Image: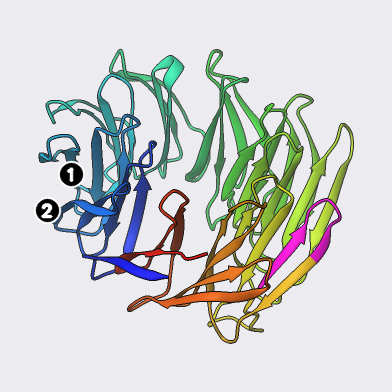
Amino acid sequence: MVDISVYQGHYKAVRCACLSLDRKYLATGSEDCMVIVWLMKDMKVFKAFNGHKGIVLCVCISDDGKYMASGDINDKILLWDLGNFTSRFLCGHYKGISCLVFADDGMMISGSWDGIVSVWNVHSGKCDFSLLGHKSSINCMVFICKDNILVTGSDDKTLRLWSLHERRQVFIIQAAEVRINCLIFALGLNAIIYGSGDSTGKDNSVKTLYINSWIQESLISNFRYPVNTIEINTTENFLFTGSSDLLTIYNLINKVQIKTIKNKFPIYFLKWINNDNIFYSINRSSLHFYSINKNTEEKIQFPGHYNKITSSIWSKCKKYIITSSGDNNSFPQDFTIKIWDIKSQNHIKTINFLAQELTCIFIIKKQKEISYLAIGCSDNIIIYDWEKDKITRCYKMLKSKIVNLSFCLYKKLIVGINSYNMSAYIIKY
């Protein structure tokens, strides 16, 4: 492969990144207080902003790709127009910006550690109005487009619903005895499902708030540790929750807890696989699949790694799943990539790497389901030929390990991102 360009600009760790809906722009925010935007089509720098005075915590791009917003630890929001290259600061918060979301009608919404929700007009750059009520940091928010309702969860133990049309709080509930960590909107139920908990263990639980009736319902309350993640299946009849020691499956139709699975290590991730009636979770050292049928649940475990799983990726037709392991700071050390056949549940292949920390995987599909693997291996990008079972290319990036990989089939470009730069390489098959 040939190095065609190295995009340098950040000199400290990248804290956030966002790809536009049309995949035209990539934005990165960093601890160096900079936001850098790349034009993905031509692989050229689109715009770099160094106006932030503090660490950039969040960045988002509007669905139409016209606007970009970023928030920093020093209470400032930077908004820029991607059409005419103009930018402006949005000032109003007095603590760090924790979350940003673009809404309808040219609105952008910000949540902050100061407990304030601000709604901004992206055309004028002015704050149309602020929503006051939270007494502590805002941790999570979701915008419900059909009702023009914003829902926020906070350290102050409350869940609040805000009407953006009426510019006021329409409902508040003491949703938990401790902080609210995560929330999702279930469209079919017209309800907010949220998880709470902290180190005190007072209210490590999952609850539902029905929007029409404002009735709160406790779903699961037997968690020893805080609820970290929530997932719901496509038909919204099963709810999955993960904490430090439990994976719970809850039937939302019958309103019964149908399965509780104890885990030795914390659950880092839950994901529902559409149309396959299967979901999977990742904990420290193994990958678990769970098949949900009408009245039964079948657990399929894929053991094999001796260290924590650092990344996983599905092939396009869901025939294979590929996992990587390897952390220089954990023991026993296991620097391997394993390929599994989902239908037969068999382990197909193991690729060994000697003392190289594996951080990310990307499947390059040429004609077959898998033609090549692009692997982030410490500070190297490795191209692995699936058919020939060997490494065909290796390129060393500068300064630090690879944190993300992406691929453009049309231009045959592999893009690697680390904490300091983005590099693009032409792959020769």
The residue singled out by tag 2 in the image is 51
The residue singled out by tag 1 in the image is 78
Looking at the image, residue 16 sits to the left or right of residue 381; the answer is: left
Q: Quadrant of the N terminus?
A: bottom left
Looking at the image, residue 149 sits to the left or right of residue 359; the answer is: left
Most extreme residue toward the front, as rendered?
A: 429
Name which residue lies at 58% across and 52% down: 226
Crowding around mark 2 (Cα neighbors within 10 Å: few <14, some 14 to 19, many 20+) is some
Q: Secondary structure at mark 2?
A: loop
Q: Which mark is residue 429?
A: none
Name which residue lies at 56% across and 77% down: 327
Q: Is residue 386 visible?
A: yes
Image position of 173 with respect to 429: above or below: above
Task: Examine the structure image and report whether residue 401 is included in the region drawn in magenta.
Answer: no
Sequence-wise first label, 2 or 1:
2
Mark 1 is on which residue type?
A: Leu
Mark 2 and mark 1 residues within 8 Å of each other at the beta carbon: yes
What predominant SS class does the magenta segment belong to?
Answer: strand
